[in-house]
Image (spheres, rainbow, N blue to C red):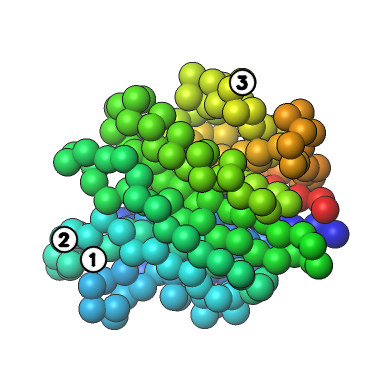
Amino acid sequence: MELTLLTINTWKCDGDYYNRRELLKRELKKMDAQVILCQECFRSADGSVDTLDELSQALGMAAYAVPARKKMRLLGDAWVDSYSGLGILTALPVTDQTVIDLPSNAGDGGRKVQLLTIRLAPGQTIRIANIHLTHLADDELRRCQLQTVLATMRRSPATFRILGGDWNTEALSPLLTGMMETVPAADCYVLGKGTQPVWVDHFFTLPLGAEPSIYPSFIRAGVVLDRPDADSGLYPSDHFGIRVTLVY
């Protein structure tokens, strides 16, 4: 059996928001992902504009939303009270959702991690951490945030334990190389033999069970949503996405 996961930062309400949102819908339909992790999910405080809900309806997937980072944002030419949250889209059976506050500071408050458990088959579950680590030039804060996520994930009894999202750090950064050495964790993109350069979006897996060096199998890893629309020249986001396929 195979499970395809994708992560994409939907970039709040920035840029040509409504046309980008339509482009996101269209391109995500082509991705054939069963689990989609989204960050910077824009939702107006009154609920009249909601990126995750729009994607949910277009893709026929349930939306599991975590509103976060409430503030005024510029949508078109109007300031709107709104959220920039986390969200996971899937049609698979979800057995649990947990939200944990991450360490933060006044310059970048309100960071959370979204933890979702999905039943894949009898006796097999996957625990997914959808993260968006701080964008500040503060490696120590980012490290503390990641350690908070890892502490929770390491206690999970799920068959597979995957961390994905926008890490705001590059693949060979000390943060990620240190994590791989000490946890240990493995880069799903590397396990799946992805070849294109990646930026700040990643998927990592913890080992299977108590074995520190045995990891799940991944195939067809690649960068996605990295091309402009042929007619408008728009990109779906200011980030490219990552897609990996787990074999179980």
Q: Residue at x 75, y 41 (%)?
A: 208
Crowd class of label 3 (few under 14; some 14 to 19; many from 20; radius 10 Å): few
Q: Which residue is mark 2?
A: 72
Which residue occupies the foreground of this view, 179 or 9? 179
Residue 43 marker? none
Amino acid marked by disc 3 = Glu
- Local secondary structure at mark 3: helix
- Local secondary structure at mark 2: strand
Q: Which residue is mark 1?
A: 82
In the rendered image, is residue 92 in sight?
A: yes
Q: CA distance from mark 1 to mark 2?
A: 6 Å
Relative height, residue 39 to residue 103 (above, below): below
The answer to whether marks 1 and 2 mark residues whose Cβ atoms lie closer than 8 Å is: yes
- Local secondary structure at mark 1: strand
Where residue 202 appears, as percent x and y from the top left, is 56, 40
The answer to whether marks 3 and 1 mark residues whose Cβ atoms lie closer than 8 Å is: no
Q: Quadrant of residue 69?
A: bottom left
Amino acid marked by disc 1 = Ser
Relative height, residue 203 to residue 59 (above, below): above
Residue 181 marker? 3
Q: CA distance from mark 3 to mark 2?
A: 40 Å
Amino acid marked by disc 2 = Met
Relative height, residue 200 to residue 171 (above, below): below
Disc 3 vs disc 2: which is toward the camera? 3
Q: Quadrant of residue 198?
A: top right
Where residue 118 appears, as percent x and y from the top left, is 65, 64
